[in-house]
Protein backbone atom coordinates (compact mmCIF):
# COMPACT_ATOMS: atom_id res chain seq x y z
CA UNK A 1 0.00 0.00 0.00
CA UNK A 2 1.29 3.46 -0.89
CA UNK A 3 0.97 6.31 1.58
CA UNK A 4 1.67 10.01 1.75
CA UNK A 5 3.13 11.38 4.96
CA UNK A 6 4.00 14.75 6.42
CA UNK A 7 7.73 15.12 6.97
CA UNK A 8 9.27 17.00 9.91
CA UNK A 9 8.95 20.28 8.01
CA UNK A 10 5.19 19.63 7.69
CA UNK A 11 5.33 19.11 3.92
CA UNK A 12 3.54 16.26 2.21
CA UNK A 13 5.92 13.58 0.96
CA UNK A 14 5.44 10.35 -0.93
CA UNK A 15 3.84 8.22 -1.96
CA UNK A 16 5.94 5.57 -0.24
CA UNK A 17 5.27 1.97 0.75
CA UNK A 18 4.51 0.93 4.31
CA UNK A 19 7.89 -0.86 4.32
CA UNK A 20 9.58 2.44 3.51
CA UNK A 21 7.66 4.16 6.33
CA UNK A 22 8.82 1.43 8.73
CA UNK A 23 12.41 2.15 7.65
CA UNK A 24 11.87 5.90 8.15
CA UNK A 25 10.48 5.17 11.61
CA UNK A 26 13.50 3.00 12.46
CA UNK A 27 15.75 5.91 11.39
CA UNK A 28 13.80 8.31 13.61
CA UNK A 29 12.55 10.39 10.66
CA UNK A 30 8.89 9.73 11.47
CA UNK A 31 7.07 8.78 14.68
CA UNK A 32 3.66 7.49 15.80
CA UNK A 33 2.41 11.10 15.64
CA UNK A 34 3.41 11.61 11.99
CA UNK A 35 0.35 12.16 9.80
CA UNK A 36 -0.21 9.71 6.94
CA UNK A 37 -2.92 9.11 4.36
CA UNK A 38 -3.44 6.44 1.73
CA UNK A 39 -2.61 7.15 -1.90
CA UNK A 40 -6.35 6.87 -2.64
CA UNK A 41 -6.91 10.22 -0.93
CA UNK A 42 -8.56 9.31 2.38
CA UNK A 43 -8.26 11.55 5.45
CA UNK A 44 -5.03 12.10 7.34
CA UNK A 45 -4.43 10.00 10.44
CA UNK A 46 -1.40 9.37 12.62
CA UNK A 47 1.09 6.68 11.69
CA UNK A 48 0.41 4.96 15.04
CA UNK A 49 -3.36 4.78 14.31
CA UNK A 50 -2.72 3.53 10.80
CA UNK A 51 -0.47 0.74 12.06
CA UNK A 52 -3.06 -0.38 14.64
CA UNK A 53 -5.73 -0.61 11.91
CA UNK A 54 -3.55 -2.45 9.40
CA UNK A 55 -2.37 -5.86 10.57
CA UNK A 56 -0.09 -6.28 7.52
CA UNK A 57 2.11 -3.44 8.79
CA UNK A 58 2.31 -5.05 12.23
CA UNK A 59 3.26 -8.40 10.68
CA UNK A 60 5.99 -6.69 8.66
CA UNK A 61 7.21 -4.92 11.80
CA UNK A 62 7.32 -8.22 13.76
CA UNK A 63 9.10 -9.94 10.87
CA UNK A 64 11.65 -7.10 10.70
CA UNK A 65 12.26 -7.41 14.45
CA UNK A 66 12.79 -11.18 14.18
CA UNK A 67 15.14 -10.71 11.23
CA UNK A 68 17.09 -8.16 13.27
CA UNK A 69 17.46 -10.62 16.16
CA UNK A 70 18.48 -13.35 13.71
CA UNK A 71 21.14 -11.03 12.22
CA UNK A 72 22.58 -10.29 15.67
CA UNK A 73 22.71 -13.98 16.61
CA UNK A 74 24.24 -14.92 13.25
CA UNK A 75 26.84 -12.15 13.53
CA UNK A 76 27.72 -13.33 17.04
CA UNK A 77 28.48 -16.82 15.79
CA UNK A 78 30.29 -15.68 12.64
CA UNK A 79 32.41 -12.96 14.26
CA UNK A 80 35.32 -15.22 15.30
CA UNK A 81 35.48 -16.68 11.80
CA UNK A 82 35.56 -13.18 10.31
CA UNK A 83 38.37 -12.24 12.70
CA UNK A 84 40.42 -15.26 11.63
CA UNK A 85 39.75 -14.68 7.92
CA UNK A 86 40.78 -11.01 8.25
CA UNK A 87 43.93 -12.05 10.15
CA UNK A 88 44.81 -14.50 7.38
CA UNK A 89 44.27 -11.82 4.72
CA UNK A 90 46.48 -9.34 6.60
CA UNK A 91 49.33 -11.79 7.05
CA UNK A 92 49.00 -12.86 3.41
CA UNK A 93 49.14 -9.25 2.17
CA UNK A 94 52.26 -8.58 4.25
CA UNK A 95 53.87 -11.69 2.78
CA UNK A 96 53.02 -10.62 -0.77
CA UNK A 97 54.23 -7.04 -0.27
CA UNK A 98 57.33 -8.14 1.65
CA UNK A 99 56.93 -5.44 4.31
CA UNK A 100 55.15 -4.86 7.57
CA UNK A 101 53.14 -1.74 8.46
CA UNK A 102 55.76 -0.86 11.08
CA UNK A 103 57.94 0.60 8.29
CA UNK A 104 55.71 3.69 8.01
CA UNK A 105 55.08 4.14 11.73
CA UNK A 106 56.50 6.75 14.10
CA UNK A 107 56.28 4.19 16.91
CA UNK A 108 57.27 0.87 15.27
CA UNK A 109 57.30 -1.20 18.48
CA UNK A 110 53.76 -0.21 19.46
CA UNK A 111 52.60 -0.63 15.87
CA UNK A 112 54.12 -4.09 15.80
CA UNK A 113 52.33 -5.08 19.00
CA UNK A 114 48.93 -3.68 18.04
CA UNK A 115 48.81 -4.29 14.29
CA UNK A 116 51.24 -7.07 13.39
CA UNK A 117 51.02 -9.24 16.49
CA UNK A 118 47.20 -9.34 16.56
CA UNK A 119 46.53 -11.43 13.43
CA UNK A 120 49.41 -13.74 14.33
CA UNK A 121 47.87 -14.36 17.75
CA UNK A 122 44.48 -15.06 16.13
CA UNK A 123 45.98 -17.58 13.72
CA UNK A 124 48.15 -19.30 16.35
CA UNK A 125 45.19 -19.55 18.70
CA UNK A 126 43.08 -21.21 16.01
CA UNK A 127 45.93 -23.56 15.09
CA UNK A 128 46.40 -24.61 18.72
CA UNK A 129 42.66 -25.08 19.18
CA UNK A 130 42.36 -27.22 16.06
CA UNK A 131 45.39 -29.33 17.05
CA UNK A 132 43.90 -29.81 20.52
CA UNK A 133 40.53 -30.84 19.01
CA UNK A 134 42.19 -33.28 16.57
CA UNK A 135 44.27 -34.79 19.39
CA UNK A 136 41.08 -35.26 21.46
CA UNK A 137 39.27 -36.80 18.50
CA UNK A 138 42.13 -39.23 17.78
CA UNK A 139 42.12 -40.30 21.43
CA UNK A 140 38.33 -40.71 21.46
CA UNK A 141 37.73 -37.85 23.87
CA UNK A 142 34.74 -36.22 22.18
CA UNK A 143 33.83 -33.96 25.16
CA UNK A 144 37.40 -32.62 25.20
CA UNK A 145 37.20 -32.00 21.44
CA UNK A 146 33.98 -30.02 21.88
CA UNK A 147 35.54 -28.01 24.70
CA UNK A 148 38.58 -27.30 22.52
CA UNK A 149 36.43 -25.98 19.69
CA UNK A 150 34.29 -23.84 22.01
CA UNK A 151 37.42 -22.48 23.71
CA UNK A 152 38.93 -21.63 20.32
CA UNK A 153 35.75 -19.84 19.30
CA UNK A 154 35.56 -17.65 22.41
CA UNK A 155 39.33 -17.10 22.44
CA UNK A 156 39.00 -15.20 19.15
CA UNK A 157 36.53 -12.77 20.72
CA UNK A 158 38.72 -12.37 23.82
CA UNK A 159 41.82 -11.74 21.71
CA UNK A 160 39.98 -9.10 19.69
CA UNK A 161 38.76 -7.35 22.85
CA UNK A 162 42.22 -7.35 24.46
CA UNK A 163 43.87 -5.92 21.36
CA UNK A 164 41.13 -3.28 20.91
CA UNK A 165 41.60 -2.13 24.51
CA UNK A 166 45.38 -2.07 24.03
CA UNK A 167 44.99 -0.05 20.80
CA UNK A 168 42.68 2.40 22.55
CA UNK A 169 45.12 2.89 25.42
CA UNK A 170 47.99 3.49 22.98
CA UNK A 171 45.86 6.00 21.08
CA UNK A 172 45.06 7.84 24.30
CA UNK A 173 48.75 7.87 25.29
CA UNK A 174 49.74 9.21 21.86
CA UNK A 175 47.13 11.98 22.07
CA UNK A 176 48.34 12.96 25.55
CA UNK A 177 51.92 13.03 24.25
CA UNK A 178 50.88 15.26 21.32
CA UNK A 179 49.06 17.65 23.69
CA UNK A 180 52.10 17.76 25.99
CA UNK A 181 54.39 18.52 23.04
CA UNK A 182 52.32 21.58 22.12
Image: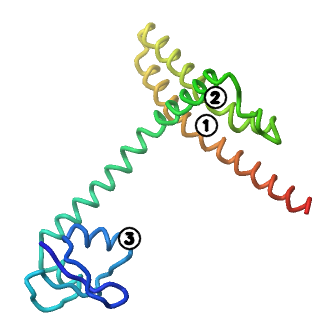
Quarter holding the C terminus? bottom right
Which residue ends up furthest to the right in the rendered image? 181
Image coords of residue 108 (percent x, y): 80, 36
Which residue ends up furthest to the top in the rendered image? 138
The correct choice, above or below, for 39 with respect to 80 in the image is: below
The correct choice, above or below, for 70 with respect to 110 in the image is: below
Q: Which mark is residue 137?
A: none
Q: Residue at x 12, y 68 (%)?
A: 56
Q: Would you say 103 lies left or right of 19 here? A: right
Marks 2/1: CA distance? Answer: 8 Å
- Secondary structure beneath disc 3? loop
The correct choice, above or below, for 39 with respect to 123 in the image is: below
Q: Which numbered disc flags the more N-terminal residue, 2 or 1?
A: 2
- Secondary structure beneath disc 1? helix
Q: Would you say 110 lies left or right of 129 here? A: right
- Secondary structure beneath disc 2? helix
The correct choice, above or below, for 69 with respect to 124 in the image is: below
Foreground pick, 78 / 4:
4
Q: Residue at x 84, y 58 (%)?
A: 176
The answer to the question of whether label 2 and label 1 lie on touching residues, with beta carbons closer than 8 A, is yes
Q: Which mark is residue 159?
A: 1
Q: Which numbered disc flags the more N-terminal residue, 1 or 3?
A: 3
Q: Determine which quarter of the picture holds residue 50.
A: bottom left
For disc 2, the marked residue is 121
Q: Nearer the viewer, mark 3 or mark 2?
A: 3
Image coords of residue 95 (percent x, y): 63, 21
Marks 1/3: CA distance? Answer: 33 Å
Question: How dense is the environment of label 2, judged by Cα within 10 Å: few (below 14), some, or many (20 and up)?
Answer: some
Q: Which numbered disc flags the more N-terminal residue, 3 or 2?
A: 3
Q: Determine which quarter of the picture holds residue 139.
A: top left
Q: Which mark is residue 27?
A: 3
Foreground pick, 69 / 89:
89
Amino acid sequence: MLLYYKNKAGNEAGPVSTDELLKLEAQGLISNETEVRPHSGAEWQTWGEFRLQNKDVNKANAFGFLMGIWTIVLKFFLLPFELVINAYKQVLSWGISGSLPTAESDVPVLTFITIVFRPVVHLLSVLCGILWAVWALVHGQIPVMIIALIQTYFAQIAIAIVFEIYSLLISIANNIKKMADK
